[in-house]
Image (cartoon, rainbow, N blue to C red):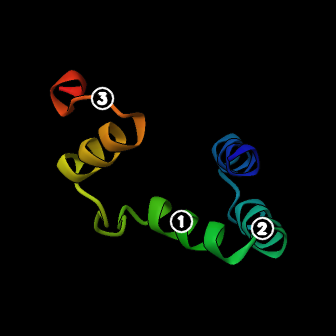
Amino acid sequence: MHRFAQLFQALDRTTKTNAKVEALAAYFQEVPDEDKLWTMALLSHRRPKRTVNSKLLRAWAASYAGIAPWILE
């Protein structure tokens, strides 16, 4: 996340296309593939669909914590 924040700041600081391309190229050479996918999704406004909905996440969290699901509501 720290590296993505640095990229975002670098992109925001300049209006020069070449500087933006250089910042993106350096970023994509350094980060793991998973981070590359998320960066492309966030910058293109095309986030992937949720794999887990909030209802299921609450149920898992309650089960893991050993508490009643209504407490998380």
Q: Mark 3 or 2, which is nearer the eye?
A: 3
Which residue sits furthest top? 71
Label 3 with label 1: CB-CB less than 8 Å: no
The answer to whether 12 is drawn above or below residue 35 in the figure is: above
Q: Which residue is drawn at the image coordinates 72% and 69% (left, top)?
A: 21
Count all numbered tags in the image, as a single digit. 3
The residue where tag 2 is placed is 31
In this rendering, position of residue 62 left or right of residue 2: left
In percent of width and height, residue 56 lies at 22, 53
Query: What's under tag 2, amino acid-wise?
Result: Val
In percent of width and height, residue 16 lies at 70, 57
Q: Quadrant of residue 64?
A: top left
In this rendering, position of residue 24 left or right of residue 54: right
Query: What's under tag 1, amino acid-wise?
Result: Trp
Q: Which mark is residue 38?
A: 1
| Separation (CA) of disc 3 from disc 2 | 38 Å
| Separation (CA) of disc 1 from disc 2 | 11 Å
Q: Secondary structure at mark 2?
A: loop
- Quarter containing the C terminus: top left
Q: Secondary structure at mark 1?
A: helix
Instruction: Give the mark nearer the N terminus: 3 vs 1.
Output: 1
Q: Mark 3 or 1, which is nearer the eye?
A: 3
In percent of width and height, residue 43 lies at 49, 60
Q: Secondary structure at mark 3?
A: loop
| Separation (CA) of disc 3 from disc 1 | 33 Å
The answer to whether 58 is drawn above or below residue 52 in the figure is: above
Q: Which residue is drawn at the image coordinates 35% and 67% (left, top)?
A: 46
Which residue sits furthest front? 66
The residue where tag 3 is placed is 67
Query: What's under tag 3, amino acid-wise?
Result: Ile
